[in-house]
Image (cartoon, helix red, strand yellow):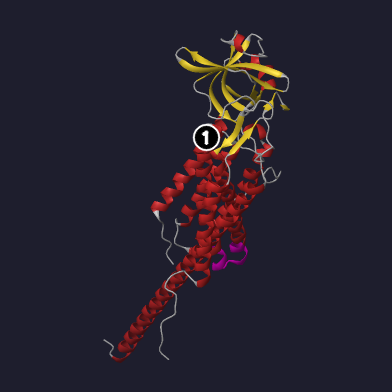
Amino acid sequence: MAGPDKRRDGTGSRGSRLLGAGALVSVAALIVLAFVATDADVRTHPTTGEEFGQFDAVRMLYLHVPLAVLMYVAFVVCAVASAGVLLRRTAWWDVTAYAAAEVGTVLCGLVLVTGSIWGRPVWNTWWEWGDVRLMTTLVLFLLFVGYLALRRTTTDPRLQARRAAVVALVAVLDIPLINRSVVWWENRTLHQQSTLAELKIEDLTLFTLMFGFLAFGLVAWWLLVHRFRVGWLEQAATDYDVAIALAERRFETSATDLDAAIGRRDNREDPV
Amino acid sequence: MVRKRRPGALLLLLGVVAAVVFVLLRSLGDASLFFYEVPEAVELRSELGDDRFRVVGTPQPGLVEGELGGEAAVVFTLCAGDVLADVVHLGDPAELFQPGVPVVLQGTWRAGRPPSLTGLDGAADDGWFLRTDHMVVKHDNDYRSDGAQLTLCGTVD
């Protein structure tokens, strides 16, 4: 029975479209919560009456912290999938690792940018060389940019997957350093300690921060799904190209064999 | 199967490696402590000599703002626990600079009495002062309306 072709042209599906719509609505709601609904961080000293705090700069909290945590998640997914590449050696693990690495690198770049924008009014500096948390995060970003570059240095997919998996497993060791740096090197970092671990946050501020995790979590998930599907299609296209090339080679070989065979027969029939 | 090399990607990879090395070298260049606490800076005063170093502490109330040599300056006393150090900071202070909020300062020890010292309450007045020109604020992690307090000399007021 003839009917409309229901094959997908792109990487979208009903589920991913719903996910994307949810991500868009959540980010819009987060912007309203972070920049309109919540108050600026203005505290009043109980005895002197002086105002202090981070004032409007505190709104960066709702972007920076969720992006940082989701960056950790993306890179850990990449590391787990990379272990899968080395143990199982299947394309599924490699495509997952690649997709997670790309999403994690984008998130890491955003963490550095939002941190810098937050740092300027609150710390009085865009960047501080020698600050252990800033430096370890920058190193993580560069390691994963290197991971992505490494993947493009060879066209051999198996070699690409194995090399990248090793780099990812080494790079991800930087994550505990980043996370614990504010505790282990307290006198080497300007960066404040974890707010959530000590639950020094409450009410609408806490709700907005949690909502930030949801909103950026949906965005990251949507990106991961689509990047995985693109990677899978690339993989299928490569396999298809390889199959075509093999078929052509077989055909060439057969034709050569045939020619040779014909030549031998010709030689037998018509010896000079 | 013939493995194709991609020179552009290889150059990018080399660029990334160079960037990582640069970052590590910049970090290792500051391999000494990122900052000293005020008591450490006072204790190591003779060793530090004319070296530039970073120090963290809490500005005391009663700072004096003015001009020194045509440049904006603020004179105040930095403290940690019961150890004090007088400071002459040249240049505009940080936006969120105020007594009770810890700062990290960069500069050198200078012998002598800082100018405008008489305007300060509870100055160290020990014949030394820190002459600094770089100030960053070390903010706390408390976002509760009644959680964070201004810190005065290591005590929560």
Residue B10 sits above or below residue B51 on the image: below
Image location of residue A253, percent across then percent down: 39, 79
Give the quarter of the image for residue B63. top right
Residue A127 seen: no
Q: Which of A198 and A189 is in front in this view?
A: A198
Kindly identify which residue carries mark 1.
Answer: A121
Secondary structure beneath label 1: helix
Residue A189 sits above or below residue A102 on the image: above
x 46%, y 16%: residue:
B71
Dividing the image into 4 quarters, which one contains the C terminus of chain A?
A: bottom left
Image location of residue A211, percent across then percent down: 60, 54
Circle 1 packing at 10 Å, graded few (<14), some (14-19), many (20+), is: many
Q: Label 1 is placed on what type of residue?
A: Pro
Instruction: Indicate left or right for A50 with A108 as reference.
Output: right
Q: Nearer the viewer, residue A212 or A167?
A: A212
Instruction: Indicate left or right for A22 with B8 as reference.
Output: right
Give the quarter of the image for residue A243. bottom left
Magenta region: A84-94
Dividing the image into 4 quarters, which one contains the N terminus of chain A?
A: bottom left
x 63%, y 51%: residue:
A207
Disc 1 is attached to a residue of which chain?
A
Residue B60 sits above or below residue B6 on the image: above
Residue B20 seen: yes
Image location of residue A255, percent across then percent down: 35, 82
Image location of residue A203, percent across then percent down: 66, 48
Residue A68 sits above or below residue A8 on the image: above
